[in-house]
Image (spheres, helix red, strand yellow):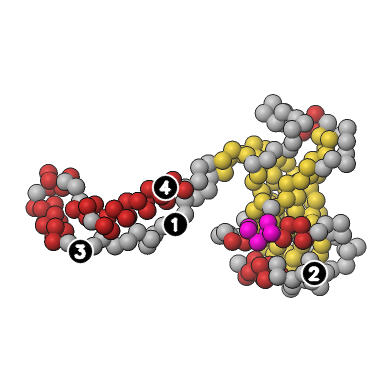
Amino acid sequence: MKTLMLLSALLTLSVPGQNPAPAESFPVTVLSSRWFKSRQTIEKPDTTGTTPAAAMIPANKTWERTRREDVPRAGEPDPNVDTLDGRRAAMEKSVQESRAPKPADGFAYRAKIKNASTKTIEVLFWEYQFMPSSNPTTVSHRQFLCGVNIKPQKDIDVQGFSLSGPGDVINVGSVADASANGLQERVVINRVEYADGTIWQRKDWNFGEVKLSVARALQGPWAPGMCKGL
């Protein structure tokens, strides 16, 4: 995605914003939001082409000919297993399988966002906030970066995943609505990057605080509409 490549380049700048839109023209409207327990499965890395080719040995031809001529003997061990390349390939496969991530139980945070501006939005920084009613100054943040394509006056659903729940002040296993236990919640838009290169950013949000997290997020694969946690 060209916009995310541009965002990666912006990480080298010391100034968090570039050609910012007027702060008084808030560009995005949050229409609705919710969170729920979820499970995310991360796909195994593609290891196609990483396994070394088997060494050519005389037993290859004999084994293959026997396999074709005598089907019952096809279950005999592949002679390549005993070669250096064969053992190396088996070890590599074992390492890859051990590194493959498992499904993770966590929480999904979803918001319906409307582009209230006259320009197309391509990158969106937003966060889901939780504040205990007894102490509203204590804010729990779940921040996300999304690659989007929101045309003017159009709306989309964005969703991020986090291992962290709304907070320790409620039992998310038994309560569906956080507000029922005195936990206020809201969605806040931190930064908007437009297709024309201009940027809007919330005044009291510091891009520098998430710069390293953004860099890590950009290292992985991206797909249209994808959101990653910061």
Where's residue 114, x and y in %? Answer: 76, 56
Question: Label 1 vs label 2: CA separation?
Answer: 37 Å
| Mark 2 Cα shell of 10 Å, populated few (<14), some (14-19), many (≥20) | few
- Magenta stretch: includes residue 155: no
Seen from this angle, which residue lies furthest left?
69
Local crowd at mark 1 within 10 Å, few (<14), some, or many (≥20)? Answer: few
Residue, disc 3: 56
First-in-chain label (4 vs 2): 2
Q: Nearer the viewer, mark 3 or mark 1?
A: 3
Residue flagged by tag 3: what amino acid is it? Met
Sequence-earlier tag: 3 or 1: 1
Residue in the picture at 68% in, 40% down:
164
**Residue 214, magenta (yes or no):** yes
Q: Callout 2: helix, strand or loop?
A: loop
Residue 26 left/right relative to 162: right
Q: Secondary structure at mark 3?
A: loop
Image spot of residue 156 (x, y percent): 70, 54
How far apart in space, not on screen, are marks 1 and 4 (Cα)? 11 Å
| Three-letter residue code for mark 4 | Glu
Please name the predominant secondary structure of the magenta segment in the image. helix
Q: Which SS class for mark 1?
A: loop
Residue 15's tag is 2
Give the structural element (helix, strand or loop) at label 4: helix
- Which span is picked out in magenta? 212-217
Query: Is any part of residue 191 visible from this angle?
Result: no
Q: Which residue is mark 1?
A: 46
Seen from this angle, which residue lies furthest right?
Answer: 24
On screen, residue 20 versus residue 49, left or right, reads right
Question: Which residue is at the front of the view, 13 or 110?
Answer: 13
Is residue 141 something one can see in this rendering? yes
Judging by the rendered image, the residue that carries numbered circle 4 is 97
Nearer to the camera, 101 or 22: 101
